[in-house]
Amino acid sequence: MTCCHSKPATMTHQLVVVAISIGAFAALAYSINNYRKWKSGKSRRHAKPFLTNKHESKTVTLISKESVTHDVRLFRFQLPNSDNTLGILAGEHIKLTADIASRTMFRFYSPISKPEEKGYFEIIMKIYSPNSENPNQGTFSRYMDSLPLDSDITISGPFGRFGYLSNGDFLVNAKAVMKYKSIAMISGGSGLTPMLPIIREVIKENHINGPKLSLIYTNKTEDDVIQSDELKRYAHTHDSFNLTLVFTRLMKKESDRQDPVKWIEKFERIDESLFSNTFPKPQENVLVLICGPKGMNEAAKLICTSLGYPNIHVF
């Protein structure tokens, strides 16, 4: 005798099996896709990379220096082999080490050159001066500024939690891949440097469905803006890039401007209204990146947290 419930039970069992199979297939597909993205990042990093282990120190040669602003320099370093890439993804950083006044000192910097660039890399560095409160301020940057061409310096890397892959994908902690549809950035002064390579990569890709970029960039005056022409050019030519320049000292008069602008300029301090009016609404697919002076970093993170942004990274 057959139970009257046996057929529905069999069908239910079949549906469960199908559902599990579909779920397993989806999970497998997601894992394969993630693995491919991870491999993509590894292949870009390992196109004959110079840096492969952050615990290993290597030597490079300073081949040029030029002024970007009155207190910011662009340094170019030559790699030993012209076929080498540095081995750094956009958003990652390296450590520079030097013996200064009988002390071994180091600082971290974000290269601004393209990840695929061969034979050399570039960093932007602000040159700090000592003051009464901190007489040792700027010891490392002033050493670098005085370093003669053809001098060698020790570097190591890569360092950092975030490395940009492509089309909104980030390599996180060197193993996971996360996708973001919007990247909201707050930079102060030389804190632009980890953002600039990411901006360049996204602009270069020019994907229709690529991530939207919003940058709030704070400086004392217009003369302190790093890569000003480049940023304004991106704002003019790419609708996906939203630029807001914030100055803490008086700007030029509107009548002094030569051309109409497609970016926003403000004379104020960062606050909640500035962020909420500039950035996309808080969502899981929005990544907030912060880099600047310590006080600005703390204030920006506090504001973004209070607004409800779930993914906040301070360089």
Image (spheres, rainbow, N blue to C red):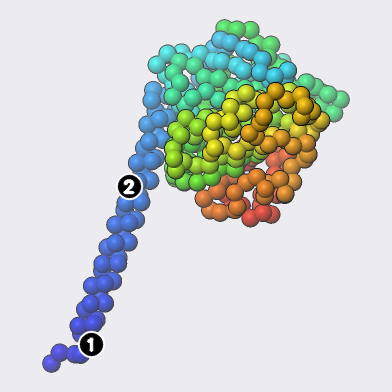
**Which residue is pictured at 58% across the width and 10% down the height?**
64
**Which residue is pictured at 41% across the width and 35% down the height?**
41
User: To which quarter of the image does residue 69 belong?
Assistant: top right
* Residue 270 drawn above or below residue 147: below
* Residue 72 drawn above or below residue 93: above
Q: Is residue 138 left or right of residue 115?
A: right
* Residue 245 drawn above or below residue 128: below
- Report x, y in % for residue 44: 40, 30
Mark yes or no: residue 132 visible.
yes
- In this orientation, which residue lies closer to the viewer: 174 or 156? 174
Amino acid at pointer 2: Ile
- Report x, y in % for residue 145: 68, 14
**Which residue is pictured at 53% across the width and 42% down the height?**
212
- Report x, y in % for residue 24: 31, 59
Tag 1 secondary structure: loop
Q: Which residue has dot 1 on it?
A: 5
The C terminus sits in image quarter: top right
The N terminus sits in image quarter: bottom left
- In this orientation, which residue lies closer to the viewer: 271 or 36? 271
Q: Which residue has dot 2 on it?
A: 32
Using the numbered discs, state the Cα–Cα distance from disc 1 to disc 2 in whole angstroms. Answer: 40 Å
Tag 2 secondary structure: helix
* Residue 122 drawn above or below residue 179: above
